[in-house]
Amino acid sequence: MYKISLFILLPTIGMAVTRHVYETDGAQGIQSAIDASNPYDTVMVHSGTYYVRDIGILGITMKDKIILLSPSPDSVTLSGANSTGTDTAYHVIYCDFGNASSRDAVIKGFTIRDGRAKESSGRSAGGGGILCYRSSPTIINNVITHNSSTKMGGGILCFQNSSIIRENTITFNSSGFGGGIGCSRDNTIIENNTFTSNSAGYDGGAIYCEDYGSSLISNNIITSNNANYGGGIYCFFSYAKIINNTITYNSAII
């Protein structure tokens, strides 16, 4: 069971709590700590590998204004698989807060891998690593790798949101559209990330933007990704702003 061991007094919101989760608690310990938390509480996940399919098909369900934190991506892995290796969740982390204006939820310091979003699962067909559906978590300093979706956003799907995605390594993810990140009807900030070796069966090996979204894509390294169209970035009916990125050695078939 997770442990409560630290209280921090924050002048604007009162008493916030840190709940500590250990590998022996499993992924259910993470979910229980999130469920028990109030706005601006922290869930600190300690070293180990946590198999989120053991919780359910959607993986870990985040709440708005919760800080999900680990010491470093090297020490904590959230895997979409179950502990027996026989099945995978649609997402590693599932966000559906119904509040796209708040960026107060934080996901920081994890290796996030093995999510498998599937076409037959409705909106869960996107965002194998993290699904942001009408939700805007701040996603910072993670390694997002070896996730997939049959539709959009192998690593992350941003839909009707305004997430901040910063200082992540996004690598070896795959999807139909947007192997690394897919963005639709959004105002996502994507900055200072490294995208390598992501792939899309159709468009946008690293990043795909569509449906009149207004993503800001700045100061990223985008290299060695591939797709049919737009090996690095593909924009379709999009107002995306693409500023000061390093885009090299990407490939497109057409």
Image (tube, rainbow, N blue to C red):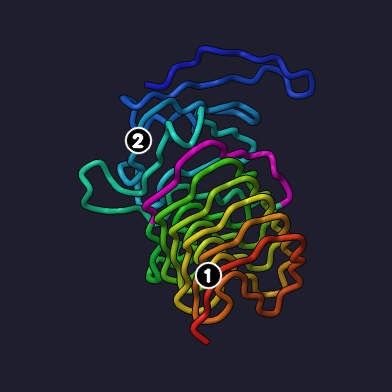
Does the magenta run of residues contain 106? yes
Q: Earlier in the sequence, mark 2 or mark 1?
A: 2
Q: Nearer the viewer, residue 99 or 184?
A: 184
Q: Nearer the viewer, residue 152 or 169?
A: 169
| Residue at left offset 51%, top offset 65% | 224
Find the distance from the CA under tag 2 to the CA under tag 1.
Answer: 28 Å
State the SS at label 2: strand
Does the magenta run of residues contain 32? no
Direction from residue 205 to residue 99 in the image, left or right: right
State the SS at label 1: loop
Q: Amino acid at mark 1?
A: Gly
In the rendered view, would you say 146 is above or below 40?
below
Where residue 146 appears, as percent x and y from the top left, is 40, 55
**Quadrant of the image occupied by residue 132:** bottom right
User: Predominant secondary structure in magenta?
Assistant: loop
* Count of residue discs: 2
- Identify the image quadrant of the N terminus: top left
Graded by Cα atoms within 10 Å as few (under 14), some (14 to 19) or many (20 or more), the crowding at tag 1 reads many
Q: From the image, tell me which residue sits under label 1.
A: 205
* Residue numbers of the magenta segment: 101-115
| Residue at left offset 33%, top offset 41% | 51
The circle drawn on residue 49 is 2
Q: Amino acid at mark 2?
A: Thr
The circle drawn on residue 56 is none
Report if the CB atoms under discs 2 and 1 are less than 8 Å apart: no
**Quadrant of the image occupied by residue 27:** top left
In the rendered view, would you say 204 is above or below 11?
below
Where residue 8 appears, as percent x and y from the top left, is 66, 15
| Residue at left offset 44%, top offset 46% | 112
| Residue at left offset 40%, top offset 41% | 78
Where residue 24 appears, as percent x and y from the top left, is 31, 25
Where residue 48 appears, as percent x and y from the top left, is 36, 30
